[in-house]
Amino acid sequence: MRTIFEENILKLSPKLAKDKYEDIFKVCELLIQNFLISQIKRLVHFDRIDEMEEFELDLLSKELHIDYYNPKYTLEEKRKVCNDSLQTHMKKGTVGAINTLLGTFFKGAKVNQWHEVGLNPGYFNINISDASINESIEDILKMIETTKKKSQHISQLTKNGKVELNLNFATGIYTHKEKTIIGDFNI
């Protein structure tokens, strides 16, 4: 099989056109070589997401219409979101899309549909059992809102994780002696 890297327009053109338009074919070939073939690696986005710089990922997210993309994500999160965006868009409005979205940011996230937990039709619960959750509840809900169907409703969002608390306890004794004076008597 021939590829664009092996052939040129002059070789592929018919003999009648070669004689008449040889100079035009040479100019076209030069333009294709300089502006297309030499830059072809930059044209293929999905093959080079892991090599892209942060500003390129920001531009790619706009081009791919990633609704829940946030420029404040870390470089690794941006790469993961861009890699998963096509899969999320293809499944948009399904539980699979919500699972893909949650799996991008949280390990152990699970969507329980209405028939699994005894809710009314169209409702679902989300349980996130990740110990290191950096996203706020509002951000998580906004991400899910852009991915789910409009007829689906979140009944419950549960975040489970370990919380490290430094608690100081102190004990003390307080005594209070009460005196009541009745008339002239002291009790």
Image (cartoon, grey):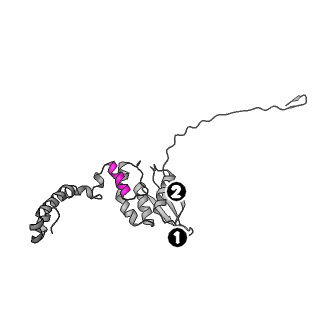
Under tag 1, what secondary structure? helix
Q: Residue at x 49, y 56 (%)?
A: 142
Give the residue at mark 2: 158
Residue 81 visible (yes or no): no
The spot of residue 126 in percent (x, y) is 50, 60
What residue span does the magenta drawing correspond to?
52-67
User: Nearest the camera: 175 or 17?
Assistant: 17
Residue 170 visible (yes or no): yes
Q: Examine the image and state in which quarter residue 109 appears.
A: bottom left
Q: Residue at x 13, y 60 (%)?
A: 26
Under tag 2, what secondary structure? strand
Crowding around mark 1 (Cα neighbors within 10 Å: few <14, some 14 to 19, many 20+) is: few
Task: Point out which mark residue 115 bears.
Answer: 1
Mark earlier in primary sequence (2, 1): 1
Magenta highlight on residue 63: yes
Q: Residue at x 43, y 65 (%)?
A: 92
Q: Residue furthest right?
A: 183
In whole angstroms, how far apart are the C-alphas of marks 2 and 1? Answer: 18 Å
Please report contact status of discs 2 and 1: CB closer than 8 Å, yes or no.
Answer: no
Q: Examine the image and state in which quarter residue 27 appears.
A: bottom left
Task: Point out which mark residue 88 bears.
Answer: none
Q: Residue at x 84, y 32 (%)?
A: 180
The residue type indicated by label 2 comes to Thr
The residue type indicated by label 1 comes to His
User: Nearest the camera: 29 or 71?
Assistant: 29
The spot of residue 53 in percent (x, y) is 31, 49
Left or right? Give the position of 42 relative to 81: left
Could you tell me which quadrant the C terminus lies in?
Answer: top right
